[in-house]
Image (cartoon, rainbow, N blue to C red):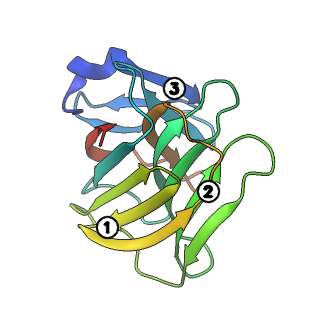
């Protein structure tokens, strides 16, 4: 579990300038760039993983947010459950990172995550499922990322609008 800054040293930021914000939240620091990928490196997790976050009360509604599992260090590919506020708002399930990584499923247009809401992604074998507040939103299959990898989160601000807190709580690991 993530809560407060005591666990900050176990995060690896692969792209951007995100991290522990205000000793409490995972979020975006000042002067950051447009993509922030944070993975949890404290343990080696099995191939069947989960990752979930509680949305901050202060998250900007134009911010893209993703929870992911099985991130490979070698090429950054991962399975992610994502809210994309563009095009009327979409829930996406993606194999992200690397070259030619496809979108596996889309639900749009839709309402996005609200403050206090929980986003969760699970990978079981080749089935990847996204949940919001415990309700299944989206599911897809893929056979590329079957090995252990790191779970984590992605924060993508809109334009020059840099939110500070994005996630109040993160949990992840083996299913």
2 and 1 marks in contact (CB < 8 Å): no
- Please tell me in which quadrant of the rendered image residue 61 appears: bottom left
Numbered disc 1: secondary structure: strand
Residue 84 visible in the current orientation: no
Q: Is residue 22 above or below residue 43?
A: below
Counting residues from the start of the chain, the first of labels 3 and 2 encountered is 3
Question: Where's the C terminus, which quadrant?
Answer: top left
Residue 14 visible in the current orientation: yes
Given the current orientation, which residue lies at the most extreme front position? 125
- Identity of the residue drawn at 27% across and 53% down: 56
Could you say where residue 145 lies in the image, as x and y percent from the top left?
60, 42
- Identity of the residue drawn at 58% across and 74% down: 106
Tell me if 145 is positioned left or right of 61 in this view: right
The residue that mark 2 highlights is: 142
Q: Which of the two residues, 68 or 21, is positioned nearer the viewer here?
A: 68
Structural crowding at the residue carrying mark 3, measured as other residues with C-alpha within 10 Å and reported as few (<14), some (14–19) or many (≥20): some
The residue that mark 1 highlights is: 132
Tell me if 60 is positioned left or right of 7 in this view: right
Q: Which of the two residues, 127 or 138, is positioned nearer the viewer here?
A: 127
Q: Count up the numbered dots.
A: 3
Structural crowding at the residue carrying mark 1, measured as other residues with C-alpha within 10 Å and reported as few (<14), some (14–19) or many (≥20): many
- Identity of the residue drawn at 33% across and 59% down: 119
- Please tell me in which quadrant of the rendered image residue 25 appears: top left
Q: Which of the two residues, 25 or 100, is positioned nearer the viewer here?
A: 100
Given the current orientation, which residue lies at the most extreme top position? 9
C-alpha separation, residue under disc 3 versus residue under disc 1: 25 Å
The residue that mark 3 highlights is: 13
C-alpha separation, residue under disc 2 versus residue under disc 1: 21 Å
Q: Is residue 98 above or below residue 88?
A: above
Counting residues from the start of the chain, the first of labels 2 and 1 encountered is 1
Numbered disc 3: secondary structure: strand
């Amino acid at each position: 579990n993530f809560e407060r800054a005591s666990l900050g040293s176990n995060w690896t930021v692969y792209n951007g300038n995100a991290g522990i914000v205000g000793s409490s939240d995972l979020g975006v620091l000042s002067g950051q760039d447009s993509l922030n990928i944070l993975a949890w490196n404290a343990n080696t997790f099995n191939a069947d993983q989960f990752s979930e976050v509680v949305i901050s009360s202060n998250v900007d509604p134009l911010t893209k947010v993703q929870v992911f599992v099985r991130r490979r260090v070698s090429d950054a590919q991962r399975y992610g459950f994502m809210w994309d506020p563009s095009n009327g708002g979409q829930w996406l399930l993606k194999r992200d990172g690397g070259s030619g990584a496809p979108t596996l499923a889309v639900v749009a247009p839709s309402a996005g995550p609200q403050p206090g809401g929980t986003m969760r992604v699970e990978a079981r074998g080749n089935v990847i499922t996204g949940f919001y507040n415990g309700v299944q939103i989206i599911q897809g299959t893929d056979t590329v990322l079957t090995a252990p990898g790191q779970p984590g989160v992605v924060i993508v601000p809109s334009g020059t609008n840099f939110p500070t807190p994005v996630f109040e709580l993160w949990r992840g690991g083996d299913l």
